[in-house]
Amino acid sequence: MIQINKKKIGTIGEKIAQTYLKKSGYKIISTNYYTISGEIDIIAIKNENLVFIEVKTRTSMNYGQPSEAVNNIKKKHMKHSAAIFLTHNNYCRHIIRFDVIEIFLMNGKCKINHIKQVI
């Protein structure tokens, strides 16, 4: 079996999440938005919602649910990065939301779990 590194798996998961979001009616505003506080994987808009999304991809359940990796420190970094994004962009009329998208890549299958409003 060929081993794929974590970064490659993460990139694959983010591409799958972007495709899922587009099919679900979201407009992708930014991907891999880097700030001094950290990175936001995807920033998207749907209706009145401006959504900051963390994507977690797993190929096994050895380390628990992917969303469990979004701990309080990661949530704090997401909030700070979102504040920086909002300072530099005009989205004041939107409702702000923080989501996690779990991507499971196991046994040749892909499962997506979109968890809304994690913060």
Image: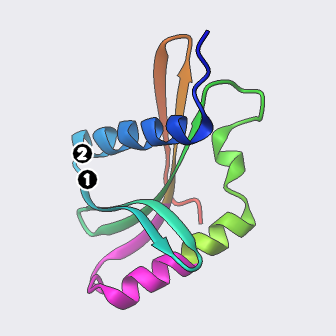
Q: Is residue 113 above or below residue 27?
A: above
Out of 32 and 72, give the one closest to the viewer.
32
Q: Magenta segment: does it hold 62?
A: no
- The percent position of residue 29, horizontal first and vertical second, equals 27, 64
Q: Amino acid at mark 2?
A: Lys
| Residue under the image location 59 percent in, 66 percent down | 119
Mark 1 neighbour density, 10 Å: few (under 14) some (14–19) many (20 or more): some
Q: Decide which of 48, 29 is in the foreground and name it.
A: 29
Q: Who's the residue at 46% across and 42% down the image?
A: 11
Q: In front here: 26 or 88?
A: 88
The answer to the question of whether label 2 and label 1 lie on touching residues, with beta carbons closer than 8 A, is yes
> Number of numbered discs present?
2
Find the magenta span and give its range: 80-98
- Whether residue 97 sits left or right of residue 70 in the image: it is left
Quadrant where the N terminus is found in the figure: top right
Q: Is residue 79 above or below residue 92?
A: above
Which numbered marker is on residue 26? 1
